Amino acid sequence: MTRANRHSRLRSNMPSNSTAASLTFTPLMKKRLTHRAQAMIGRSLTYFPELQNKRITVGYTRAHLGSAVLTYQRESEPRLIIRLKVRKLTYQTIGHELTHLVQGLGRGQGNISSPFGWKSIPSGEKQCDIWTLARDPLFCDDAPTYLKLPRVMRERWLEYAGDVRKLCIKAIDKRESFRLYIRWLEGEIHKLTQRRPATPSVPEQLLLPFPDWD
Ligand SMILES: [Zn+2]
């Protein structure tokens, strides 16, 4: 490790200079948390500048993929809570729940430094999916839950993920002037599967002569 590295690492541990969100894991989550899940949550947060310096409680859920809640207390910062399932955790799920926190904070928060200069993220589940996918390819590791996707796309999501993300970015731009941007997006997503054959064409089987084993 170089001297500069060590210095910056030390500095990043000091709360006064820290820019990352500080995480508190609930007792139940501490029991379930794996190194992998913890690393995934930490990495995801680096893509959410809007959550810098916020305190986030991370709980465990078995019932859903995840959930997010903001509780408002008088004259203090809202409490930010996400709950995640640890098994088969995806960046898509973590990103979706963190986006809900940004949606909640967006109200009344003027100066947040969002990627792409987003001023706020409109509320709603489909909106949450769109803004999560658009944020970074990292969050495209699994299909979104609420956007309407053709079945073949859910089955072979990774083949379509990049194109869907591009459409989400376009849809966010379109929203400035077009109220039905989600309907437009779902239509364009549907077209993606029509452009390619549902199954790759199988070349005709070559008829090979069998050797005689007399
Ligand atoms: Zn949601």
Image (cartoon, rainbow, N blue to C red):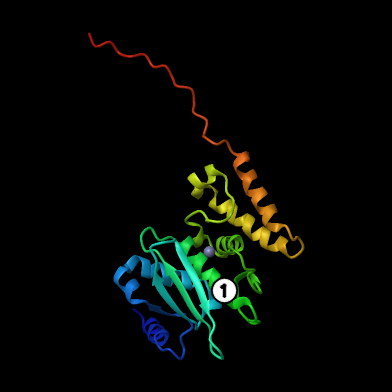
Hey, which residue is sitting farthest top in the picture? 214
Residue 45 appears at what percent x and percent y? 47, 73
Position of the C terminus, as image quadrant, is: top left
Q: Residue at x 59, y 42 (%)?
A: 193
In-front residue for pair 184/146: 146
Regarding residue 156, the answer to whether it shows in the image is: no
In-front residue for pair 174/24: 24
Q: How many badges with numbers are in the image? A: 1
**Residue picked out by circle 1:** 102
User: Quick check: 25 left or right of 76?
Assistant: left
**Secondary structure of the residue carrying numbered label 1:** helix
In-front residue for pair 198/136: 198
User: Quick check: 43 left or right of 180?
Assistant: left
User: Quick check: 2 left or right of 212?
Assistant: right
Q: Residue at x 67, y 58 (%)?
A: 170
Q: Residue at x 54, y 45 (%)?
A: 153
The picture quadrant where one finds residue 76 is bottom right
Residue 31 appears at what percent x and percent y? 29, 71
Residue 80 appears at what percent x and percent y? 49, 78
In-front residue for pair 209/35: 35
What amino acid is found at the position of numbered circle 1 in the picture?
Answer: Val
Residue 150 appears at what percent x and percent y? 57, 45
